[in-house]
Image: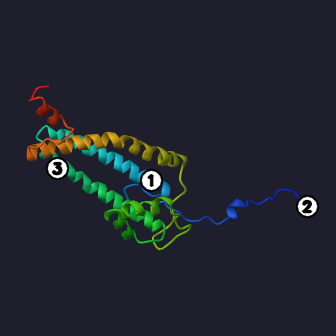
Amino acid sequence: MNNPYAAPATNMLAAMPVEPTYVPRMLATTGRIGRVRYLVYLSLSTGVLMAATALMVEGLMKIGPLASMLALVMAIPLLAVILVTTGRRMNDMGHSGWWGLLHLVPLVNVLFWVRPVLGPGDGGANQYGLPPVPNTWLLVIAAWVFPVAVFLTLPTYLKFQQRWISSVVTAYYHIPLPGTQGDAADATGGKR
């Protein structure tokens, strides 16, 4: 049985070195995440916090338009999630997570958003830790579905936000904004 064309008798896969990895968690503040997880984590957290803000505004509008300004508190956790998630993504690319603060600079933040989404991460371990495990098919599907869902719900959210802002401005300054319901009531003499 000295056939040179026969399959080897030993297990060749067991001898291959395996690169150590770790499984990232969504709410962790340290570690590295790749592009797919970055999109999923940001889209999911943005969608959840937008929905929470809308529910908070609707609940507080019953008290009064100015009380609904408390819903702006929801911007704090959203900002924290964006900064931590971007910091983890920058760590995956071998850069300091402090680069995520560029999200706070107007106009620069639009250009900076492209780098974490399109830039490749380091292949192996770097000074920020081990590389994350490969993406599952469920994560890849979520990376396509979640951003599209957030994008599709954005017009509805913006209309809701405009209605909210106009009610706050009307309540505070007693001036109805053009194109709002208060403006239509004034044009008809208060009758509808």
Q: Nearer the viewer, residue 41 or 18?
A: 41
Q: Name the residue under label 2.
A: 2
Q: Name the residue under label 1.
A: 39
Image height check: is 173 above or below 91? above
From this viewpoint, which residue is outermost toward the bottom? 127
Q: Name the residue under label 3.
A: 70
Q: Residues within 10 Å of mark 3 (few under 14, many from 20)?
A: few
Q: Which residue is drawn at 44% across and 51% down?
A: 40
Q: Nearer the viewer, residue 190 or 93?
A: 190
Tell me the distance, in whole angstroms, between the alpha carbons under discs 2 and 3: 81 Å
Q: Give how far across and how far down residue 165 sits, in percent.
A: 19, 45
Q: Give, as a three-letter code, the residue at label 3.
A: Leu
Q: Which element carries disc 1, helix, strand or loop?
A: helix
Q: Give how far across and how far down residue 44 sits, in percent.
A: 39, 48
Mark 2 or mark 1: name the one nearer the start of the chain: 2
Tell me the distance, in whole angstroms, between the alpha carbons under discs 2 and 1: 54 Å
Q: Give how far across and how far down residue 36 sits, in percent.
A: 49, 54
Q: Which of 114 and 77 is in front in this view?
A: 114
Q: Which element carries disc 3, helix, strand or loop?
A: helix
